[in-house]
Amino acid sequence: MDLSRVRVLIDEDALRARIQDLGAEIRAEYGDAPVTAIAVLKGSFMFMADLVRAIGGEVRCEFLGVSSYHGGTRSTGVVRITQDLKHPIEGQHCLIVEDIVDTGLTMDYLLRLLQVRKPRSLKIVTLLDKPTNREVDVDVDFVGFTIPDEFVVGYGLDLGEVYRNLPYIAVYTP
Ligand code: 5GP
């Protein structure tokens, strides 16, 4: 871990405030209905923990293990499921909780994977959106922050499994 390579982009206060608002926005969308939040691991584990508390009401937590990078900094478009959901999602209001949408390839794959399991509804929340690199159109329902095309780490996001435990989002410069 080399902190001289990272520069804070979104600090802890900004994250906390935005996630509170996102939670309220999401709860308003579903009313009193139960929601199944599906965290895309590993990157979204920290966001998931804060977001489900901000949503409130009845929220079931599911975890989907996905690997798309294999340690580098470019998306390959090849998505590997490393851990599947533990329960069926048929008939449930499902919310995919993602850390970042970049090319959109991962999300496009996940939408198709989950849609065939017949959820009642399927929406997406991403903490970060990097729209400049989009290769496939994905309809993201809730966005925390739109960021420029830079490689970011922290708050769950890694570079080769390092930097995930930083409490803020930072730009990493090689
Ligand atoms: P996409 O398939 O949309 O290109 O990328 C989605 C996945 O790539 C994310 O879930 C995340 O794991 C990874 N990713 C994309 N951009 C970044 C970034 O700036 N930093 C990190 N750490 N991971 C990223």
Image (cartoon, helix red, strand yellow):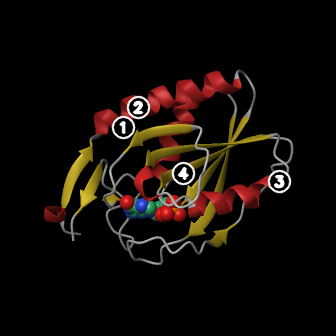
**Which numbered disc, 4 or 1, marks the residue that appears first in the sequence?**
1
Find out if the beta carbon at label 1 lies less than 8 Å from the nearest ligand 1 atom: no
**Which numbered disc, 4 or 2, marks the residue that appears first in the sequence?**
2
Q: Nearer the viewer, residue 32 or 22?
A: 22
| 74 vs 156: above or below | below
Instruction: Tell me the SS state at disc 2.
Output: helix
Q: Are the two marked residues, 1 and 2, in contact with CB atoms closer than 8 angstroms?
A: yes
The mark closer to the camera, 2 or 3, is 2
Inspect the image, locate mark 2, and give the three-letter code of the amino acid beneath it: Arg
Q: Nearer the viewer, residue 45 or 135?
A: 135
Inspect the image, locate mark 4, and give the three-letter code of the amino acid beneath it: Glu
Instruction: Tell me the SS state at disc 4.
Output: strand
**Which numbered disc, 3 or 4, marks the residue that appears first in the sequence?**
3
Q: Which residue is mark 3?
A: 88
Inspect the image, locate mark 3, and give the three-letter code of the amino acid beneath it: Pro
Image quadrant assignment for residue 156: bottom left
Can residue 38 be seen? yes
Spatial CA span between label 3 and label 4: 20 Å
Q: Nearer the viewer, residue 174 or 12?
A: 174
125 on left or right of 81: left
Identify the residue at image location x=49%, y=57%.
134
Q: Position of residue 152 (x, y in %)?
A: 33, 58
Q: Which residue is mark 1?
A: 15
Q: Which mark is residue 98?
A: 4
Image quadrant assignment for residue 29: top right
Q: Residues within 10 Å of mark 4 (few under 14, many from 20)?
A: many
Identify the residue at image location x=62%, y=26%.
27
Find out if the beta carbon at label 2 lies less than 8 Å from the nearest ligand 1 atom: no
Spatial CA span between label 4 and label 2: 15 Å
